Image (spheres, grey):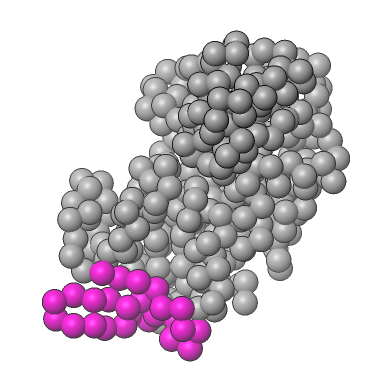
Amino acid sequence: MIKKRILVIFGGQSSEHIVSCMSAVNVINNIDRDTYDVLIVGITEEGHWLLVDSVEAIQDESWRDGTVQAVLSPDATEKSVIVIDGAGIKKIKVDGAFPVLHGLYGEDGTIQGLFALAKLPYVGCGVLASAVSMDKFFTKIIADRVGGRQAAYEPVMKEVIAGTEGMAEAVKRVEARFAYPVFIKPSNAGSSRGVSKAENREQLTEGLTEAARHDRKILVEETIVGHEIECAVFGNGKEPVIASGVGEVLAAAQFYDFEAKYFNAESRTVVNPELPGDSAERVRRAAVEIFKAVDGYGLARVDFFVTKDGDVVFNEINTMPGFTAISMYPMLFEAAGISKTELVGKLIEHGMKRY
């Protein structure tokens, strides 16, 4: 059997760069080498594309010192990676790509557009689904059409709060609509980067300023008290969309922020927790509906709150969820009897069918 070569791209210019590196190690280690050869390309935080020779180089971070450039050709007739080093230029053919990239310039439709130009099959959602799912404001517009409950929100633009008067007006608008506490979120960011909770006006101002460092669009949301629940989704196209069981996040901090997610050992996740009534099944149904509504393809993790009364409240969708050792997406499918290696294989196979 002739093995196909899969291009794995990781790193990237987003604030989730380090998470992408952690996810990439797990993805690469779970690719069946009897079926696929792997070509690894890392993108530095500055946007430099480098050929990476091993998983170990990712783990010890030595890949950042690499000198061999490797960029994907947009030429649809080539389907190749252009490698540039001191010896010259060569092209390495690839059959498909697995973009293990989180956040901006990786999960927002940009690199998916490059794959589309190259007509290179790839894992995960397409340009449109990636873009609208990355932008929480537009995700909410689509979720409104699906129906069901989501947190009420007030949009705020970075340019509006740049001046003292604009900030005061934004704060006044938020306070007229919501009681404290509120949550402040950059519209385009993941892993809870730039997210904060405000208990008063001073914290709201600080939170808006911090969120504006991550994006020009900011959402201020009402606080929903309840279980933080996540559901993994797979499929679409020629495959039926399936949802895993659900998992609950037990954050060590006030909420599940970046530090609590990846660096606080006291944060825990529970697979198939006890929830009120049939809310777990309603979460699963809603996850599939939202995934289909954004025209999702391949994979996503859809996040909800479940209140003590059993209300299911949509939070957000992540089209390239974390694949770290503690990430919910692989954990939920593992609980359903699908190993990480089997899951990665399914994702690659599904991606190869997109054209």
Main structural element of the magenta stretch: helix, strand or loop? strand
Q: Position of residue 234 (x, y in %)?
A: 64, 53
Relative to 296, is 62 on the left or the right?
left
Could you tell me residue 159's position as x and y percent?
Answer: 57, 39
- Which corner quadrant holds the N terminus? bottom left
> Which span is picked out in magenta?
69-93
Residue 224 or 309: which is nearer the viewer?
Answer: 224
Q: Nearer the viewer, residue 124 or 176?
A: 176
Identify the residue shown where x is 69% and y is 35%: 155
- Examine the rendering and report whether any part of residue 260 can be seen: yes
Q: Is residue 188 left or right of residue 283?
A: left
User: Residue lying farthest bottom?
Assistant: 77
Query: Is 153 in front, or is 272?
Result: 153
Query: Left or right: where does residue 335 sit relative to residue 220?
Result: left
**Residue at horizontal 46 percent and vertical 78 percent from the top:** 74
Q: Is residue 91 magenta?
A: yes
Which of the 4 image quadrants contains residue 119? bottom right
Where in the figure is residue 197, as x and y percent of width and height? 57, 19
Q: Is 160 above or below relative to 111?
A: above
Quick check: can you spot residue 276? no
Looking at the image, is 65 positioned above or below residue 288? below
**In the rendered image of this protein, does residue 291 appear above or below residue 208?**
below
Image quarter where the C terminus lies is bottom right
| In magenta stretch: residue 149 | no
Name the residue rendered at 43%, 47% in the picture.
14
